[in-house]
Image (cartoon, rainbow, N blue to C red):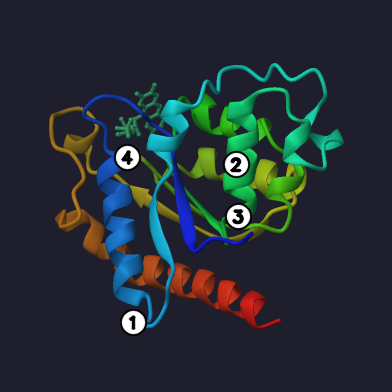
Amino acid sequence: MTSNHIPILFGSCRQNANTPGVAAWVTSRFNQKLPASSPLTLSPADSLLEKLPLGPVTDPMMAAMIQSSSRYQDQAVRAWSDFISASPAVVIVTPQYNWGYPGQIKNALDHLYHEWHAKPILLVTFGGHGGSKAAEQLEQVLTGGLKMEYVGNVQITLPRNFITAQERAKTDSDFLKAYEGEMDDAIINLLNIIAARKSA
Ligand SMILES: Cc1cc2nc3c(=O)[nH]c(=O)nc-3n(C[C@H](O)[C@H](O)[C@H](O)COP(=O)(O)O)c2cc1C
């Protein structure tokens, strides 16, 4: 069954993190671009992920061998599988960590396999230089490893005081205005891909 809910996967769960603010900004751009008649919604999957005991991958059968969620041993992974299978697309909002992407993203991805195939994925990365290294590595995983349909990547450079001091990204943060055009174009691409699939 297909849902109208596009989940946002967070790359960071730190206290006082920038990720929720960047994700709120992405959501506000999405809602502005969404046609009034569209039933689609975009919101974080974190509350769902936090409830799940998604630790290390423990299933004895690798996900690539599993074609039905009922074959996963862990109920939490079955729920994750059904949730992702039903999603029309996925958005990842993640910082760069130590020249890579945070382990929690890889962990959430590796529990599943076929569920990701051909799923449209929009990637928003950020950091001192747009999270470019995290984006490059994630793109390989998402397209090569998981065969997702890569919609694009918006790279956001955080001002220094948002990294080393207490300022945190918000929907109306000034520095995000420079990325509005690029973000809107990526969202329109995503919406067009979803619409084309629905009418196919
Ligand atoms: C563990 C860790 C590693 C980081 N590594 C990088 C890095 O490689 N490149 C970079 O530009 N910023 C790096 N930063 C700075 C982050 O981009 C910045 O702190 C960002 O706000 C982290 O996202 P968050 O606040 O949502 O957790 C790192 C931050 C943390 C906490």
Residue at the right extreme of this rendering: 65
Q: How far apart are the two marked residues, 1 and 2, measured between alpha carbons?
A: 32 Å
**Which residue is at 54% across, 45% downward?**
135
User: Is any atom of residue 95 visible in this view?
Assistant: no
Q: Nearer the viewer, residue 163 or 66?
A: 66
Quadrant hosting residue 32: bottom left
Q: How far apart are the two marked residues, 3 and 1, measured between alpha carbons?
A: 22 Å
Q: Which residue is mark 3?
A: 86
Whichever of callouts 1 and 2 sits on the residue coming sooner in the sequence is 1
Comparing labels 3 and 2, the label whose residue is closer to the camera: 3
In the rendered image of this protein, does residue 34 appear above or below residue 94?
Answer: below
Residue 68: x and y, percent?
78, 42
Whichever of callouts 3 and 4 sits on the residue coming sooner in the sequence is 4
Q: Are marks 4 and 2 in contact (CB under 8 Å)?
A: no
The N terminus sits in image quarter: bottom right
Q: Which residue is mark 4?
A: 19
Q: Residues within 10 Å of mark 1 (few under 14, many from 20)?
A: few
Amino acid on which disc 3 is placed? Ala
Comparing labels 4 and 2, the label whose residue is closer to the camera: 4
Provide the secondary structure element on which disc 3 rests: helix
Provide the secondary structure element on which disc 4 rests: helix
Q: Are marks 3 and 1 in contact (CB under 8 Å)?
A: no
Q: Is mark 4 within 8 Å of ligand 1?
A: yes
Q: How far apart are the two marked residues, 3 and 4, measured between alpha carbons?
A: 24 Å
User: Would residue 33 be found to the left or right of residue 80 on screen?
Assistant: left
Residue 119: x and y, percent?
65, 57
**Which residue is at 56% across, 59% downward?**
89
Q: Which residue is mark 2?
A: 138
